[in-house]
């Protein structure tokens, strides 16, 4: 048969590789900075862009989409060409993909620091960037499928299915969760409200972990682990089962982020059951990886690439064991909202994603520059710094989460809450310090890698176009029955469609009932839309990322009801575009903050939290006291809300600003009584209005005994 | 553009749970059966694809 000569494109792999290292370090620095602010609030520099509420989304987005994203593309562009025995479909598309993605990252960094955010975790980017992501993702898809179609290898190796599954599911998740009504160029409201928004968001959020941080990296594992160990994967059969059951199960698990919340109970239970089942494919995958190295452990001792992979796969196993356990209601009751979750995700992030990225970098750079690694010793040091860093990061946070959660739930024999919220925070500050030391070690390791790779690159010579040869696929007559899955393997588009159907089943069965059935979200007559001033205040709350530290969801537990007030009802959130339930209580829950403190308390507290609560680790927000409130968009905001069905009276947008000023003047007058002089057009006034409204509507409800006596 | 709650009430909501689990169970069994019925030799060939390129 005629063998064809062709060239692999290494240049695009190199570009994504550089971006991986650069954004990895940037993302980790942002994380470290945010972590330090938790025990040294002054590290916020008292500037809006560098305050925790904006640094934290920057950190999560940079790590997920810039660091891990570029890792995925680097690995996919390298492995796909070789698994398909062909060059990428189009060099132009490759470079549009590369530069498009980096521009999105740059735009994300700037807009997040400026406070442009949708307020939905890991989906914070505003609508123009959401559209850009969609377009670039389509470019990636065309390039990937073009490559698969022109391949010279008949069978699609398992890694490619993971890439296909990833592509189609991420597209679906991103589009469904990002449906929003634009108000201005950089401000939009989520189309969904309250419970529905929460369900869609965590269906997305959980599956961003599943299909952006897990399945593509598993695909990379199935390629790079056999390469580095120079032996095939332990069981190819297991990898088939791993793939199909993983993508089927993952999509259901989202509601385990909402246990004990106002989400309907049946949806919570569904999430728990499927989360528990997830352990089997996850561990199947982990064991498949580790067993591949059976009889090759001597190599692991020598080769830094395999070292990183072994710890990465082990961390994958640990966090996928922990995940199902955390979705058990009784464990979740303790772990949720606490630092336990932060520890859990960093076992996945630092261990699984980070170490896989490092392993692949250490494998690819010597290969593509046709040389040996500059220093194995440095790489081994990086390995140990990273490993110790992970332990030093995670253990204190597990400790902190567990002790703080138990302190929250502690009652005195007289039946009073034993600890003030602030006491539970100051108690774990040493753990926050230890965590940032762990993070620093890990980051130092990343710098060592950068140095090691630069040295390696200097001594090698880059092979931009790597020569290869292979025979084209010959159409041969199928005699007899061919196995179903291999027929499917030969058809990438069928694979795409079936993967999509598999992930859609979960999404549809889970989301649709909550949207269609009225009894799932009981309405409460006394819950009314926000006033224009409160709406503006709420948008500032979203802008400053308050949800990164404060929840707005009181679970029906004795301690939470005693501490925060009556537990939250689904009907209270029907006008919340977006929902702001939060996922972490670094500060106390705010669902019923309204009326708890005076206006002047909030005013002083925002200016300097420690003046009102000595020892508080909340950053100060002095700019809220100085910035004039932008009311030019009030009417547009009211109209956007009306579009989504919020019942403002017709023509209300025209009088909205007058109403706004009236309410603002009332607040300023109350502040004046407490000897605080401020103009009524400041942002702080809107924030106070929102805070004082929160969770109060339900109190206006007629009492059950009153209604009974009226009968 | 607004959500309308089309159904007033959800009766027998447990059917969703059972249905979901049932679909998965059947799907999983199908994958399992077909995987193990497949040709062992062919599986071995496919699993060597990453190792077969000339640079290794």
Image (cartoon, coloured by chain):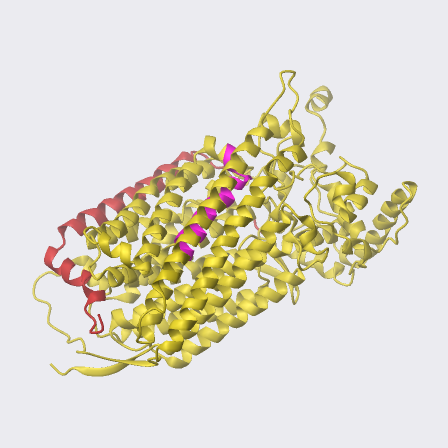
Chain colours: A yellow, B red
Q: Quadrant of residue A356?
A: bottom left
Q: Which residues are magenta?
A: A334-355
Q: Horizontally, is A295 left or right of A495 in the view? A: left
Q: Say which quadrant the N terminus of chain A sits in.
A: bottom left
**Which one is in front, A599 or A16?**
A16
**Which one is in front, A414 or A395?**
A395
Q: Quadrant of residue A539?
A: bottom right
**Which one is in front, A32 or B7?**
A32
Residue A41 located within the stretch drawn in magenta: no
Q: Horizontally, is A168 left or right of A104 in the view? A: left
Image position, residue A343 (x, y; %): 49, 44
> Magenta region, mostly helix, strand or loop?
helix
Look at 22% across and 73% down and name the residue there.
B55
For residue A57, above or below residue A419? below
Image position, residue B3 (x, y; %): 57, 50
Image position, residue A551 (x, y; %): 61, 42
Look at 35% across and 59% down and name the residue there.
A165
Residue A353 located within the stretch drawn in magenta: yes
Q: Say which quadrant the C terminus of chain A sits in.
A: top right
């Amino acid at each position: 048969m005629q063998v064809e000569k062709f060239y692999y494109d290494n240049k695009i792999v190199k570009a994504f590789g550089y971006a991986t290292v650069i954004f990895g370090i940037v993302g980790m620095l942002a994380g470290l900075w945010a972590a330090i602010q938790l025990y040294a609030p002054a590290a916020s520099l008292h500037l809006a862009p560098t305050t925790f509420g904006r640094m934290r989304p920057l950190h999560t987005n940079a790590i997920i989409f810039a660091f891990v994203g570029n890792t995925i593309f680097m690995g996919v562009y390298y492995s796909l060409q070789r698994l398909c025995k062909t060059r990428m479909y189009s060099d132009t598309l490759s470079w549009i993909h590369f530069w498009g993605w980096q521009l999105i990252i740059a735009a994300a960094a700037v807009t997040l620091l400026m406070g442009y955010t949708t307020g939905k975790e890991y989906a914070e980017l505003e609508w123009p960037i959401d559209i850009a992501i969609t377009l670039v993702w389509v470019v990636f898809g065309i390039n990937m499928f073009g490559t698969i179609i022109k391949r010279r290898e008949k069978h699609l190796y398992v890694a490619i299915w993971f890439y296909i599954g990833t592509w189609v599911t991420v597209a679906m998740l991103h589009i469904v969760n990002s449906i929003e009504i634009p108000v201005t160029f950089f401000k939009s409201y989520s189309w969904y409200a309250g419970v529905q928004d929460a369900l869609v968001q965590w269906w997305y959020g959980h599956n961003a972990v599943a299909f952006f941080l897990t399945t593509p990296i598993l695909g990379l594992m199935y390629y790079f682990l056999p390469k580095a160990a120079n032996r095939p994967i332990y069981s190819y059969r297991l990898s088939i089962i791993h793939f199909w059951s993983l993508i089927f199960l993952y999509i259901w698990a989202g509601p385990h982020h909402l246990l004990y919340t106002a989400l309907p109970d049946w949806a919570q239970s569904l999430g728990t059951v499927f989360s528990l089942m997830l352990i089997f494919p996850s561990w199947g995958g982990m064991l498949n990886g580790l067993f591949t190295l059976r009889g090759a452990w001597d190599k692991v001792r020598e080769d830094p690439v395999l070292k990183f992979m072994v710890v990465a796969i082990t961390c994958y196993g640990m966090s996928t064991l922990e995940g199902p356990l955390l979705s058990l209601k009784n464990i979740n009751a303790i772990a949720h909202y606490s630092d336990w979750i932060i520890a859990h995700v960093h076992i996945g992030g630092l261990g699984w994603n980070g170490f896989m990225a490092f392993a692949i970098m250490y494998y690819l750079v010597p290969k593509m520059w046709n040389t040996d690694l500059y220093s194995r010793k440095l790489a081994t040091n990086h390995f140990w710094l990273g490993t110790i860093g992970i332990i030093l990061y995670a253990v204190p946070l597990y400790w902190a989460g567990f002790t703080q959660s138990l302190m929250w739930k502690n009652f005195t024999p007289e039946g009073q809450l034993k600890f003030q919220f602030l006491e539970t925070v100051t108690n774990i500050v040493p753990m926050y310090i230890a965590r940032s030391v762990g993070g620093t070690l890990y980051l130092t390791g990343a710098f060592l890698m950068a140095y090691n790779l630069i040295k390696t690159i200097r001594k090698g010579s880059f092979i931009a176009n790597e020569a290869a040869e292979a025979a084209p696929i010959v159409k041969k007559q199928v005699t007899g029955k061919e196995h179903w899955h291999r027929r499917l393997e030969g058809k990438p588009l069928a694979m795409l469609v079936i993967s999509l159907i598999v992930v859609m089943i979960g999404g549809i069965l889970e989301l649709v009932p909550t949207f269609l059935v009225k009894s799932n979200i009981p309405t409460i007559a006394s819950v009314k839309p926000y006033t224009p001033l409160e709406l503006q205040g709420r948008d500032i709350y979203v802008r400053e990322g308050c949800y990164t530290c404060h929840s707005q969801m009181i679970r029906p537990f004795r301690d939470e009801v005693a501490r925060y007030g009556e537990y939250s009802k689904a009907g209270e959130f029907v006008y919340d575009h977006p929902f702001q339930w939060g996922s972490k209580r670094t500060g106390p829950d705010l669902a019923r903050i309204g009326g708890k403190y005076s206006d002047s308390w909030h005013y002083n507290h925002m200016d300097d939290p420690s003046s009102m609560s000595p020892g508080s680790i909340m950053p100060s927000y002095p700019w809220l006291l100085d910035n004039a409130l932008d009311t030019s968009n009030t009417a547009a905001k009211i109209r956007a809300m009306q579009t989504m069905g919020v019942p403002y009276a017709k023509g209300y947008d025209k009088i909205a600003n007058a109403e706004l000023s009236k309410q603002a003047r009332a607040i300023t007058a109350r502040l004046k009584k407490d000897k605080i002089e401020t103009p009524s057009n400041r942002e702080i006034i809107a924030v106070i209005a929102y805070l004082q409204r929160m969770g109060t509507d339900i109190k206006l409800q007629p009492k059950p005994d009153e209604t009974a006596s009226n009968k | 553009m607004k959500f309308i709650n089309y159904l007033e009430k959800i009766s027998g909501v447990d059917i969703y749970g059972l249905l979901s689990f049932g679909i998965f169970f059947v799907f999983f069994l199908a994958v399992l059966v077909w995987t193990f019925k497949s040709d062992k030799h062919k599986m071995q060939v496919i699993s060597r694809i990453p190792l077969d390129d000339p640079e290794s």
